[in-house]
Image: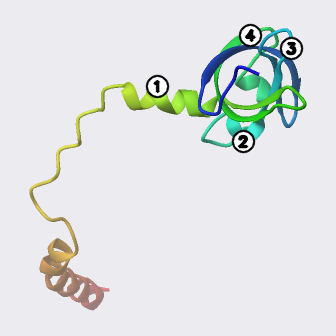
């Protein structure tokens, strides 16, 4: 078998089940993309990530020489492409510290106003 762990390959989706997607790598090699290897996030529906007949780039996670099958990952390839994208500029930090100090400064005035209102009622 000419495949090794870590290699990026292209394969065609040949079957979709609730637990993952089956692929054909070449005429002798098949593989499985387990549902946990489709995305970093929660995957409710495998078909929201891959479609029958679609060709996808995958990373080889495991090679079984005897059965001629591969364990594959879609999310590993997507994570690599995300790392190569330019990062967004960091958000501007506020110069002032925001906290309870502004409330503390007003608290005595608010208490006095409330006491005046209660005397009038």
Name the residue nearer the viewer: 36 or 111.
Answer: 36
Tell me the residue that label 2 is attached to.
Answer: 36
Tell me the residue that label 3 is attached to.
Answer: 28
Tell me the residue that label 4 is attached to.
Answer: 54
Which structural element holds mark 1?
helix
Q: Around disc 2, counting alpha carbons within 10 Å, would you say few (fewer than 14), some (14 to 19), or many (20 or more)?
A: some
User: Residue 20, image x and y in percent?
Assistant: 82, 32
Q: Quadrant of residue 24?
A: top right
Q: Around disc 1, counting alpha carbons within 10 Å, would you say few (fewer than 14), some (14 to 19), or many (20 or more)?
A: few
Which structural element holds mark 4?
loop
Which structural element holds mark 3?
loop
- Asked whether disc 2 touches disc 1, contact meaning CB atoms under 8 Å apart, the reply is no
| Of pointers 3 and 4, the one earlier in the residue sequence | 3
Q: Up-down: is 53 above or below 35?
A: above
User: Residue 97, image x and y in percent?
Assistant: 14, 65
| Of pointers 4 and 2, the one earlier in the residue sequence | 2
User: Residue 2, image x and y in percent?
Assistant: 71, 19
Q: CA distance from mark 2 to mark 1?
A: 18 Å
What residue appears at the point 46 percent right and 25 percent down from the top-left corner?
A: 81
Tell me the residue that label 1 is attached to.
Answer: 81
């Amino acid at each position: 078998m000419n495949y090794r762990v870590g290699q990026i390959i292209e394969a065609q989706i040949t079957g979709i089940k609730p637990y993952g997607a089956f692929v054909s790598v070449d005429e002798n090699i098949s593989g499985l993309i387990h549902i946990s290897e489709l995305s970093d996030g929660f995957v409710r529906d495998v078909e929201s990530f891959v479609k029958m007949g679609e060709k996808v780039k995958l990373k080889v996670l495991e090679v079984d020489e005897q059965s001629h099958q591969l364990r594959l990952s879609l999310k590993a390839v997507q994570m690599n492409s995300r790392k190569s994208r330019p990062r967004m500029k960091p958000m501007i930090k506020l110069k002032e510290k925001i906290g309870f100090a502004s409330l503390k400064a007003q608290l005595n005035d608010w208490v006095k106003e409330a006491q005046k209102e209660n005397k009038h009622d």
